[in-house]
Image (tube, grey):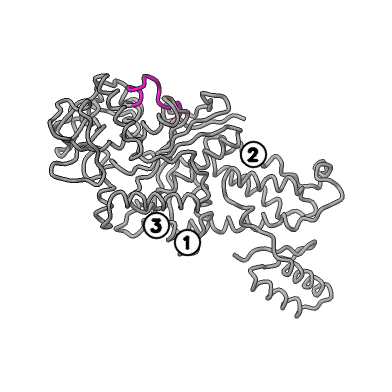
Amino acid sequence: MTLKFHNTLTGHDDEFVSQVPGKVSLYTCGPTVYDYPHIGNWAAYIFWDILVRILKANNYEVTRVMNMTDVGHLVSDADEGEDKLEKGARREGKTAWEVAEFYANVFTEGMNRLGLVMPDYITKATEFIPEQLDMIRALKSKGVTYQIDDGIYFDISKFPRYADFAHLDLEALQAGARVEYNPQKRNHSDFALWKFSPAGEKRDMEWETPKDILENPSDGPVMGFPGWHLECSVMALAKLGKTIDIHTGGIDHIPVHHPNEIAQSETANGVRFSNYWMHNNFLKVDGGKFSKSLGNGYTLDQLEDRGFSMMDFRMFMLQGHYRSESNFTFENLQAAKNRLHNWRNIAALRHQIHDTIESDKDRNADDKTLSLYATSQAVIEAVSNDLNTPEALKIIDEAFSRVQNSKLDDINSHAFLQLLETIDQVLGLQLLKTSPDISDEAKHLIIERNIARSQKGWAKSDKLRDELLKGGIVVRDTNQNSIWEYTI
């Protein structure tokens, strides 16, 4: 099967070919752990979870690294302002280390709640300080760094291909630079590899700057901390090697963060940093941006408080393509919840399909038998085409509609179960887990009700129906069967 992804590096949908047959190295730009992530943050990680799942469905062994930025991410991508971790520490009256540990745990818990495949390595920037300093040394030896009052910077003029990735107009950026940008920088887009701690300020997270990376070493220690852009390059290199197969991130990383990663990595190592770059678009809320001041920076807990599950949110995200802008409203989330509820009730039919003497293999050739083997393959093919989850959901809806309109005895149970397993494997919607069989007591009540109906005992039938409703089960009567479904 052909895997195709839209590659920001080429601007085209490229067939995916890994460096090592059957193996994929994947790096995901992870969170800055200074506050609770909102659902706009989580959107990206759901999409990259689908990427991991479809690679595995195509028989690739995936080695994935995701960083947690716990130092050095300033409030501006242009290396201006305060470190987000220091800002979080001041807000909460804790140390930056305590803030980083707390929100790193919050994020890991959120990944588990959303059913995301855990990366093989979750790396923290503070654990790779020596390696980051080594890369700065390598870059200095190649003559691409310079030092100014507030840190050590990468000179982008020494990397002629800097503007290619994001198709930047560097002259226009330079001409339009705001006055508050550091006038000591040689070029507007030069970026910090290592920032010096402000004079007279003791940071929670700071390290002594080695004298060999300084241009004019002083007698006393110079404290500092790594630049945000440097961290990703170093952690990818440490765990995945000089060239990786796929690098993922948000479209907001295209103009600054990822060109910086490319420039420093390829200058230091002399080879291409990543062969494929994939970027997800934004999730908006009520047509606008997420904002704490507007009270719409919804967290996973806030969705649950309103009666929505993590799988409802996952379904909502999969209804849009990862490269298209999505709009979150609670009405849209309710529609996704309704869709998933219907799917769960269809998945529950597997408990109600009775075994037959004739094998499913033999029945597959019977014109009356509904076979779904091809549907499983079609779902995988849709997602293999640049993570086209909306197309995959459409294919599943059409197949489930055929299931609903078929007699239970005419459904190929093996093919049906395989389809449910494929949906869970590729889309991670946990249909099998969330559609358990009902109790023997409930089944007995359904049998009693069917007997009462056959004897026209309508009062008893209604009473038994009400008992089932109390247990969260509704019975739908057809010409052939009485089919039970979940009420919620």
Mark 3 or mark 1: whose residue is earlier in sequence: 3
Question: To which residue does mark 1 refer?
Answer: 304
218 sits left or right of 166 in the view: left
Mark linked to residue 298 = 3
Q: Is residue 10 visible?
A: no
Residue at 30% x, 37% y: name it: 228
Residue at 53% x, 41% y: name it: 50
The image quadrant of residue 146 is: top left
Task: Please say if 87 is above or below 377.
Answer: below
Few, some or many residues within 10 Å of mark 1 (<14, 14–19, 20+): few
Mark 1 or mark 2: whose residue is earlier in sequence: 1
The image quadrant of residue 176 is: top left
Task: Give the camera-side residue of 208 and 192.
Answer: 208
Where does residue 162 sit, x and y in percent of width and height?
A: 31, 25
Question: To which residue does mark 2 refer?
Answer: 378
Mark 2 or mark 3: whose residue is earlier in sequence: 3
